[in-house]
Every structure is written in C-alpha cells, then in structure tokens.
Amino acid sequence: MLLQQVADAAQAGAHPLSGTAARYVWLLPVLPLLGFVLNGLLSLTSAFKLGPADPSASHDDHGVHAPAGLEHGGGGHGDDHHVVARHRHAGLASLIGPGVLAASFLLALAIFAAMRGAGGGEMHAPFVQRYFSWMPVGDLQIDAAFHLDQLSMVMVLIITGVGTLIHLFSIGYMQDDPGYPRYFAYLNLFVFFMLVLVLGASYPLLFVGWEGVGLCSYLLIGFWFSEKANADAGKKAFIVNRIGDFGFLVAMFMLFAHTGKLDFIGVASAAPTTFAFGGAVVTTICLFMFLGCTGKSAQIPLYTWLPDAMAGPTPVSALIHAATMVTAGVYLIARSNVLFSLAPAAQLTVVVVGALTAVFAATIGLKQWDIKKVLAYSTVSQLGYMFVGVGSGAYVAGVFHLMTHAFFKALLFLGSGSVIYAMHAAYHHTGNHDDAQDMRNMGGLKKYLPVTWVLMWAATLAIAGIPPFAGFFSKDEILGSLFLRAHGSTLAEAHWLGIPGSAVIIVCYMLGLAAAFMTAVYMTRMMLYTFHGPNRTGEPERGYLHEAPWIMTGPLVVLGVLSVFGGWLNLPSLLPLGPVGLLDHWLEPVVGEGTLRVTKGVVPEAAHSTEVALIGAAVVIAVVGIALAFARLKPARLVPKSQSPAEHGFEKVLANKYYVDEAYDAAIVQPIVSGSRGLLWRGLDAGLIDGMTRLLVQGKDDDDAPGTTVPMGGLLSRSVGWIGSQLQSGQVGTYAWVLVVGVLFVLGAFTFR
Amino acid sequence: MREFLLSVAYDRWILPALLALPLLGAALVLIGNRTSTEGDDEVATGAADRPRLVATLVFALEFVLSLGLWWSFDAGRSGWQQRFDMPWIPSWGIRFTLGLDGIALMMVLLTTFIMVLASFGSWTSVRQKAAPYYALLLVLTTGMLGVFMSLDLFLFYMMWEIMLVPMYFIVGIWGGQRRIYASLKFFIYTMVGSLLMLVAIVYLGLQAQHEVTLHGMRQVVPDFSYDTIMATARVTPHAALWLFGAFFLAFAVKVPMFPFHTWLPDAHVEAPTAGSVVLAAIMLKLGTFGFLRLAVPLFPGAAMNPTVRTIILTLAVIGIVYGALVSLVQPDFKKLVAYSSVSHLGFVMLGIFALTVQSVQGALMVMINHGLSTGALFFLIGMIYERRHTRLIADYGGLARVVPMFAAMLTFVTFSSIAVPGTNGFIGEFLVLLGAFRTYPVLAVIAATSVIITAAYLLWAIQRILFNPLDKPVNEHVPDLNRRELLLMAPLLACIIWLGVYPAPVLRRMQPAAEQFVRIVETRAAMATADAQGGR
C-alpha cells in the first residue's frame, strides 16, 4: 500500500527525481538484457545446425553431420585460458556486449547527477517506479517495481562502472575463444540480474536478481563445460548457494507472516512497531536472511563454492566472484538495516561469522599456489570484513569496503588475468602443458609485465591497508567502528551464546587485526612469487612473455587509479586530506535510522588519541606483515611446480584447505546419496511399497521381467491381465474404434432419444 | 474480442463443442485408414502421414476454439461460467451439466494447449499403428476435458473412466520394453481408487434424492448435480469421513501422493513420449483437481479434521522431499523426471490443504507450471531418445558441444523446473510455501529444503548429459533439433517465461475460485466442528 502511495506520489511529480533522468531507471537493466538476447542469438544461430526432419532415420548417418559446436577445444593446460579459433561473429559481439554496458553506465551517471541535483544525501524518500503487478494474490501484492535510493545508486555505479571495465578487458582476454558471443551473452545477463537485485523494490524482486546472478554464475563457472572439473564447480556453486537461498526464502515467509509486507518501504515502516527489540522473531528472520548471505557471499559455513568458482574465465572471477555478486549479501544486510538493528544477537552472529571467515580464509590464502586461489580466499576473507562492518551496524563502513574492494580486487583479478594470459600464450607457443596459474611456474614477471606489476602492487597495498590507498580507509573504518561498538551500543549490551556482546566485539576486533596481518603477508607473498625473483617459466617460454594489449591494460589503469584514490570518497575526520565522510552523508537517508538504533542515538566520537592509536595499530600491523613477507620469503629458492616437494604437517592441512570439502562430502553428500539410493529407492520404493502391491495383486512376488506379461495369481490380475494379453494381438485399430463408438454411444444414446 | 464472442453465442456452445470435436476427429482419423502389416515403419512408408496430420489439425482447431475462453471468461465473477445444462438420464437424476470456474478454465486451456503439442510431438516417434494412436489421443482429450468441465458427479465419474482406457492402451501398445507391466500397474492402481469413488458418488446422489414428475408419474430420483449436492447433501460426520476416504483414495493415487506413487515411475518410463507428457502435464492434475472440486469442498469437516489434515499434509511434505531424494539417484533420466513429479505434486497438495489464498493460488500455479515444465522435459527426453535410443544418463555426456540448441533448451527448462525466479516454476512454489507458512510453518520449512535437493538432482543430471567430456563416440554425430521440434518447444518456452514474469492475468482469473474455495471450506469446516461439538 505504502509502496503504491510512494509510487503514485513519484508519478504525480512530488518526488524530486521525477522528470529527471531517473525516470529511465528501467533502462539500466533492460540494456544488458538486450545485449544478452542479441549475443545469445549470435551464439546459438552460429553453432546450431538444423537436424533432419526424421531424427531416428538419420541416426546411423555417420560422417554427414560434423559436430556443430566446435567450442572449447584443447584445454589441458590446467589453466582457464583456451585459445582455439576466433568466432566469426566476434566483432559484432564485442560491440554489443561492452556497448550495452557502457550505455548503462552513462545512464547511471546521468541518474547520479540528477540525484545529486535533487539533494543527494538530503533526498529522504526513495524514488519508486512501478511497472506492473507481479504476484497479486489476496493480501499479497507484489509489484514489479524499482526502488532507487542512495544505496542502490552506489551499487548501480559499481556494477555498471566496474562491469564496463571488465567487459572491455574481456574483449582481449576472450578474443580467440570459440564461445565468444556466448560468453558475452552470459556476462550481459549477469549484469541484468545484478541490477535487478539492487534495484528491486521488494524482497521477492531482489530474490529474482539474487537467484538470477547465481544462475549466470553457474553458467560462467562452467563456461568451459567439457572439462568435468569446471562443470562440477558450477554445479557446486549453484547448489551451495541454494542452501543459502533456502534461508532467504524462509526469512521472506516469516516477514510476510508477521508484517504482511515484502516491499522494502512497507517492511521498514512496519518492522519497528511489529517486532519487539531483540525479540525472537526478528532475530530468527535476520538469522535466516544471513544464512542466505553466507551462501551468496561465501561465508562460513557455505564459502566452499567460491574457490572452486575460479574455474570460470578470469574476468568472470573479477566481476562476479569479487566485485559484484558476492557482495550481494552485504547489500542485503545494509538494505535490511532496520531489521538487523532490531536484532543485536543476530548482528553479533554476523560479526562473529564475518570475523572468523576473515581469519580462516586468510590462513588458507597463505599456502595456496594457484594465483587465482590466493585471490579467491582473499575475497572470502575481505567479504568477512564487510560483514563485520554491516553486522556491527556500521552499514556505511561495510558498503564503503564493498566499493573499494570492488576496485582493488577487480584490479587484482584482472591483473592475474593479464599474467595468466601471458603465461598461457607463452606455453601455447612452445606446446608446454604446464600449469599457467601456478605461482611456482612464474617469478620475475615484472620484467615482462611492467604495467601489470605496478598496478597490482597498488592494489596489493590497497588491500593490505597501507595509507593512503583505498583499502586503508575502508578497512580502518570497519575496525574502528567495531571497536567503538564495544561500549555503549546495543551490541555491547546484548549477549551472544551467553557471552557479553562487548567481549565478543573485542575478540572479533582482534581477529580483524589478525586477518589484516595475514592479508599483508599472503598478498606480498603472491606479488613476490609472481613478479619478483628469477623467472621459473622455462627457458623456451621466456621469450614469449609479454604485456597484454591495451584493451586489457587500459581497464587496469582505471581500476588502479580508483584503488589509489577510492578512499577519498569517505575520508575520516582525523586526516585533513579533503572533504570528510562523503559516503557517510550520502547513505545517511538509507542506513541512518538503523545505525542510530545500534549506537543508541548518539554519533560515536572516539577520543583523538584513541583514533590515532587504532589507525596506528592497523597500519603497523600491515607494514609488519609486508616486511615480514619480504624478509622471510625467498622467491629465489622456489622451484617450478613439477619439481616441488609435497607439503607436510600443518602446511599440508592449509594447502588442502583444512579438508573442509572432504568433510562435507563424507558427512553430508555421501550419506544423502547412498541413503536415497539404498534406503529410500531400493528399500522403500521398489522394495516395500511395490512389493506390497505385488503381493496384494498377484499373491506372489514377481521379478518384473521385462517384456513379459505378469504371472497371474488373483482374480483381479487375471481379468485385467487378459486385457493385457489382448494388447499384443495386434487388433488395436478395432479397440480404438470400439472405444470411440462406445463413448459416442454412451454420450449420445440418452441425449438424443 | 469479447463482443465478437458474444455475437456468436460462444459461451453457450463452446464446452460441448470442445468435448465433441475430439471424438469426431478420432472418427475422422480412423475412417479410411488401411490396416498396415505388423512391424511396418509407417513414418517411412508414409502411412502415418494422414492420421498425424488430421489429428494435429483437429487438436489445433480445438485449441483455437478453446482460446476464446480466455477472453469470454469474466475474471471478476465467481460461480460457473459458460454453463451448459441438459437432462441426460432423467430416471437416474443424471444431467449433462458443464461449466467452468477459474480453476477449470486454466486446466482446460492447459489441456488443449498440451494436446496440440503432444500430437505434433509424436510425428516421428510413433512409427507403428499411427491411426489408432492418434484416435486414442483424441478420445483421451474428451475424457480429460470432461472431467474438468463436469458439474454432474455421475458425468464426472464417467469422464474419469473414459480417459483411463486410452491411456492404458497408449502405454500398453506404444510403450517401451516393460510396457505391459507398467500399463497393468497403472490400470489397477487407478481402477481400485476410482471404483470406491463410484460408490461414494452413488451414495451422495441418493442422499440428494428428491421427488420429480417423470412421464406423468411422480417418482423419487437421485440427484447428481454438483450444485445440489453441495447445497443440500447432509451426511453425518462419520459418513463424511468414509466418503472423503473414498474420494481421497481415487485422487491420491492419481496425483500421486506418497505412498501411492509407485505406478507413476513405471508408467512414465514405459509410456511413449506423448503419453508421458499427457500423463505428467494433465492427468496428474486431475487428481489435485479432484481434491479442489470434490473431495475437499464436499467434505470440509472430514478433510479439515485436524488429524486427517495433518496426515495429508505430512504425506504431501514427505512426497516433496522423498520424491526429490529418490530423483537424485535415478540412472534413467525419464524416471528421474517421473519422481520429480511426485515432489512437485506434493507442493500442490501442500498448497491445497494449507488452505490460504496464497497457498491455493500457488498450488494452481504449480499445476500449470508442472504441466509446462515437465511436459517440456519429457518432450526433450523424447527427442534425444529418438536419436540415441537410450534414456540412461550414463550413456550421454558432453552433448552441449554436439547439439547446442537442444542443450540450450534443456538447460532452460531445467531451470524452470528448479523454480528459478523469472521462470514460471518460482511463482508456484513461492506462493505455496509463503501461504503454507502462515498455517503450517514447520511443514513449509521442511518442504522448502527441497529447493536445494531439486537443484542438486537436476543440475547433476544435465551435467552428465550435456556437459563433461564428450567421451562416447556414438554421441559425436547426434543431429540437433529439427524445424518441427523447434516449433514444438517454442510455445512451451514462451509460456515458461510469460508465467514467470507476468503471471498476474492467470492469477486474476483464478482468484475468485481460489478465494471461494478457501472461504467455503473454512466456514463449512468450522460449522462441522461446531456441529460435532454441539452434538456431543
């Protein structure tokens, strides 16, 4: 109802954004959708060869019909870059794919300008545009409507902006892939769903995007589907995400059962009056919602799919599995800040899970050799930080880190893409089948990829939290706000599993610092092993190592600038570098209420000395981490993968990711599969139920031998069995006639007398 | 459109016409058909050309005729529309009464829609005895439509039996290796259930008997009219329980509910493609339709008796999870989809018995969606079966490289079956669970776990069929879909998207009927409870 009113008000011209570029907000996702349709058609029409009119007649017709889809030949390099032949529609696809994204980004900029003109952080009502009624059922009224406010604006800018850069990078990276248009079709579709996710005006509509991006993630992880490992990884990602989606669904059911609303405006206005502060219902809702977040945003216990997701093309890892989709959980909590702020126990859960994930994933990151795996665990770890932020009610800090992380992690992934591209090209030239993603096969690459080297160092310093790079400001804001929440906030006064909230917060703060230290170490390790020391690629290959073309390095440069200066978007008051707290102010209308509830209405101000100490501690830890890595790790001593000794002890446990996958498989997957097969299907279905039926009908058990009539026992089966035996006598035409005439007679006899 | 339909008095003749046309079509198909010798490949010799063309044209005409219902049906009105009524066997009190509410409307449209495709999809897969095959499909259509339209219980029963026989023949004659076993099982299961239903219907008809003047004589005749029985039949709570039990058995077998489901996997696997499609897309819905039209509204006291209701809901939820788990381990793709039907139909039962507007509307959507998605899945399985003559998942692998169009379509339909939002599947499952959570939160949460298992079994299956290495040489030369098959799939895919993105027109048409169902059952169940307590 309220949604309706707001929408009507917006259409009536009451909203400051009506009549501006914001009225074209629907075009934002529609453009990528158009790209998907066009690229999809290009892909299908070029691969498809019409089959013969009678499929079974031509079955033995070997040789006439060559396999139509020549997609994905080769592989075998253990890497993810497969060069076979350029697609004949590659030119058109590279025009459409990035083109629609760029158009979408320009529109987003125009809408952003309009929003600034309409007051920016002073604009208090969201701009809601209603299109049609989606699910009108009784008191449930869900509209297809978009909800544009400061938070969705930030997300839209990240998605379309970083998305455009990654699309451009893909032109180079994927240029010789035979599935080129298919790739852009999926990528466009992903952006479409991602925009629906952040623009949808209700939880169910958000869920459309939420599952839609999961679908695209599935398709893109398994993009090179002819290798079982890739197809497995895609499937795993989708199924694990579905566990989370189950939680999200239950959260929606509970929300509707208690508030009767599912649109954001309705829920936000109903929640404070419907739910008691800290009550069981709202806590349960938030916990179920967070289960959804642990799936999509790869947190403990559902993070296992994300490292496997690296099987997809590297730009996909940058866009979906670093910058945008995996941050959807963070967005969801920021969007639901009113709910979460009412449930401190749930918030503490988010903080604890986030902090544990940050540390846990960082430890695994210390021992990975695959460059993308390092980045994958790093992403899991950084997402943990974001959850610490939004969990502690520092919603702006969480979203801020989401943004800076999108910059530097996209840069790191694309940079690693550049490296893999070079490595693969070199191996391809010499016909070598070594692993192009293993850092033990790299080393000394700064000589061959100088631009990538410099830019990736910038991103490394950003993620490690060295000032003034972007990650420093956002990570510092998260840890600082968390520290301040230890006293006087609703969180500090709540209890988590019986432990006082303030103690939980202090422990999580320590965990955050520990993770920051390890982040500095594993990132420096990655840089050292990849770019420094002697080259281990191999003598013949060395000559072919070179920097990627400008279409790939160009986006890297832009992301590099953002990684360096992104922090200026939300400067702390302590450092006089420019305007203070731009993002704080911008997001105030969306998350202000929730934040203030957590801090009990006061804006927490740390003493100057405390703030200096906090920042100092964080910086020192990062610097020590980097220094330690430089001091202890000796790239010169590393040997190529093929000659490396096996790990042992705790190192082996780390390299094997604590055997979590194996444990899940043994404890959950295998029991379900074998139980379903042995107990349910063979035992209950075919054994008990069917056995009883046979006994009832035939008087004795039957081995249902194929193609024979059933042995006769009872009277019923004898009579019916007679009909059965008649079926084989060939008089079918007669039966059909008898039936038709019979029915006509019965229907007509009485009617027309 | 409405004006045009009114001008030809569409409302008055459409329902009987829809019943008569397939029968006439069946006669047309059979007339002049030479009996070909045993074992002839009629597709190759051209003997199948005429029957399949005639049948498909008749089905197309039937569908076009029925489409008018979409516009002539007044979505804002509850009660019967397009009603047709004439005396039939007056001495037994049986009338030939037809009519539609929003629920029946959508089921009729689904039936005529699917039947065109079923006949068009059989063009090359039915290679022997084509004429009787298409004739049986046509007779089957009359039976199914009759069940949805009947407003006379006796007529309902007759239509129920009429559709049983052709399906029995279709499975038994054009089926696979174990077709005799499967068709017998199908026949016995359904027969046992429906005989009990006959007894219950006769009992009800006698309850409603009244005095009329026939041939100048006053005599007492039973009354089988649905409206009369609804309005006047008064049965004791004890009798209601027995009567409900009889209807329950007939419909639960048809749905099929756990544990009455074991005929389904066999029938599905052995049936020819069109048989599986019709079974899944329409015939299973007759069971749930029976609950909506007869079993629950006639005996709300018994159906909504807390014990009975809990048992049925529990069986429904067991069916949802159990069907999904058993699907997980099927080596035969067709059997996998068959068990997945048990799971999906469990959602319908959960929706009906949870008795909220959302859950009932959701159940109706699942009925439609399952028809489209599972129908499409069976078509696709049939297409690949025609090429490779195997349904075993393990015989495939890497097909996406060879048959990209087939792969794209199978993936798409799979996601609709997984109920990814944006496709039809989501709307139904979401509404059922959302609504059921209001009355039975624990059961709804258990049922919701199936979203995980459903994704697991379907994605695992399509991975082993479409993805992974193309390691079997026989699969390297499989031809992709042909023009007819593309034409066949296109409308299904369009409907899958349409109902996922903009289901509101369908929901609106079913809304009055769904609301009325919930209201009547709620008030009558409350009355029955009050009576029972008052009588004590």
Image (spheres, coloured by chain):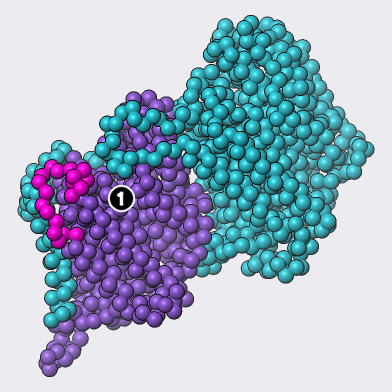
Give the quarter of the figure containing the N terminus of chain B. Answer: bottom left
Amino acid type, residue under disc 1 in the picture: Gly
Q: How many marks?
A: 1
Q: Nearer the viewer, residue B20 or A244?
A: B20
Taking A641 as reference, is B320 left or right? Answer: left
Task: Tell me if residue B439 comes above or below residue B212 in the rendering.
Answer: above
Q: Main secondary structure of the magenta part?
A: loop
The colour assigned to chain A within the rendered structure: cyan
Q: Colour of chain B?
A: purple
Magenta highlight on residue A402: no
Residue holding disc 1: B121
Q: Residue at x 13, y 66 (%)?
A: A741
Residue B180, compared with residue B476, is above or below; it is below
Please identify the quadrant where the C terminus of chain B is shown.
bottom left
Q: Residue B132 placed where, x, y %?
A: 17, 55
Residue B402 in view in this figure: yes
Question: Height in image: A722 above or below B476?
Answer: below
Q: Between residue B425 and residue B399, name the one nearer to us.
A: B399
Q: Chain of mark 1?
A: B
Residue at image position (77%, 30%) is A557
Secondary structure under tag 1 reads loop
Task: In the rendered view, tell whether residue A491 sits above or below residue B161.
Answer: above
- Taking the view exactly as shown, the residue that stands out farthest to the right is A576
Q: Which residues are magenta?
A: B29-47
Q: Residue at x 10, y 44 (%)?
A: B38
**Residue A237: % across, % down:** 52, 36
* Location of residue A582 in the rendering, given as x and y in whole percent from the top left corner: 84, 46
Q: Position of residue A145 (x, y in %)?
A: 63, 59
